[in-house]
Amino acid sequence: MDSPARKYDVLVVGAGPAGVVAAIRAADLGARTAIVSSSAFGGMAANDGPVPVRALAFAARLMRDARHLPRYGISASEPVLDYARLLARVREIVRDVRGRSALRERIDALGVDVHEQCGAARFVDAHTIETERGLRLQSENFIICTGGVSRRLAIPGFELTSSGEVWKLTEVPSSILVVGSGSTGVQIASMFHAFGTRVQLFERGQRILPGEDEDVAAAVASALRASGVEIHERFGDVTSFEKTAAGVRMHFHRAGESASAEAAHVVVATGWVADTKPLNLGEVGVDLDSRGNIQVDRFLRTSAPHVFAAGDVTGRSLLVPGAVEDGFIAATNAVAGPSLLLPQRVSPAGSFTYPEYAQVGLTEAKARETNDVATTVAHFDATVRAIIEGRTFGFCKLVCDRKSHRILGCHVVGERAVEIAQLAAIAIAAQMTVDQVARVAVSFPTYAEVLVQAAVSATLELGLPLAAEAERAGVTYAFA
């Protein structure tokens, strides 16, 4: 005889950033809350995604930095990578992040029931889920936060490849094919090139990083090629993969002709799709869009009024900050009724490649569709901190509206690009005009200066008066 299901006011399915925040918010509002996860607490972000990937990217940076030492009179032998020790360090970092999470402490303090390592959950009726390991839970309301999974290609031999989960490799491959050049693919290519792998990066479209500003994509492609990464754009369609003595061969059609490429390992990073298949959402009446994402309104409510969704599973924003905000909003509306609307979101994003790149707001091409824009660029080779540290490759590009003088977009390539984009995101969120940003005093010498330099140039381009401090800043940056 089956044991009775445990009953809750709010049941959160998925324990990543969106799910954890949703559970905290629901419990804060007085709801009896539980969170159930197929794997470990923290979800993909902590266990399989950004945390281990950033750890590997940091190791790649250390390898590059070590080769930079002789330029500053420091003698050192060529760095040698012990990949087994690196993987041990990555696992240690993942454990530390999970174990030291203040969010887990908050979850426990609020009395939220946490069900980890339960396997995939599925609806068996409108108010009951059952997991692969036999756990049955009931709730008045649900918040789906199951995230996403790498897109699989329906072609022969796909099982011979891996997705973006490259940290699961037990050794550094001698060569690698990376299929797909969005942020994940480019990061993998950059990282393993630093580890000594021969890398070929394949992009079906016109250019790598198709979602980034064109100037950013061109700069990153140029830098990767100069470092030795082979980039194949407009390469055609993959038709199959086959096992060979040396590894895996990829067959593809390009311009009507067959071609192939071979490497010890192949990574397919062609996108991220909502993880909804195991949920049996038809049982509860939750609608999906044509791409398999859960459809939600501005309250993050699905077509089933008692089911909400947050994070990657909605296909709206595939970033941790957006997932966190989604979780808060979905939980508020699940407990208190639909009252809290999604705000207009300012979402900076970047990748810890070499070189780094980051952006916030509109690309120049997108901005020109609806605005009269001015663009200005400040180059790293005119920034004192970059000159001191020998990191002079890159630029900061601002896209501004000529009428309102507001910053519509900021795009950065180069050292500390991600941090610079964060500063621009704050300015955009605060609705600062570009001349106001030009008047911000930043510490000297810092990489943040490049943003202010670009803002000073934009202020002059728009014919706006410069305050004395901005004039002084411009002199400082130019002649310090």
Image: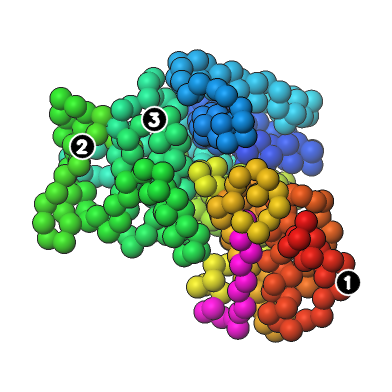
Residue type indicated by callout 3: Gly
Q: Residues within 10 Å of mark 1 (few under 14, many from 20)?
A: few
- Which residue is found at the position 77% from the left and 66% from the top? 474
Q: Which residues are magenta?
A: 368-380
For disc 3, the neighbor class at 10 Å (few under 14, some 14 to 19, many from 20) is some
What's the CA distance linking mark 1 and mark 2? 60 Å
- The answer to whether 218 appears left or right of 412 in the picture is left
Which residue position is annotated with label 3?
A: 196
Residue at x 15% of width, y 29% of height: 244
Which element type, helix, strand or loop, lies under badge 3?
loop
Direction from residue 36 to residue 428 in the image, left or right: right
Which secondary structure, mark 2? strand
Q: What's the residue type where badge 1 is placed?
A: Ala
Residue 412 location in percent, x, y? 59, 57
Question: What residue would you read off at disc 1?
Answer: 468
Residue linked to disc 2: 262
Q: Nearer the viewer, residue 209 or 48?
A: 209
Determine whether the residue tagged by mark 1 lies in a helix, strand or loop.
helix
Residue 22 image-quadrant placement:
top right
Up the image or down, 108 lies above or below 335; here it is above
Query: Is residue 77 positioned above or below 310 on the image?
Result: above
Badge 2 amino acid: Glu
Instruction: Provide residue 396's location: percent of width, then percent of height.
Output: 62, 61
Q: Which is more foreground, mark 3 or mark 2?
A: 3
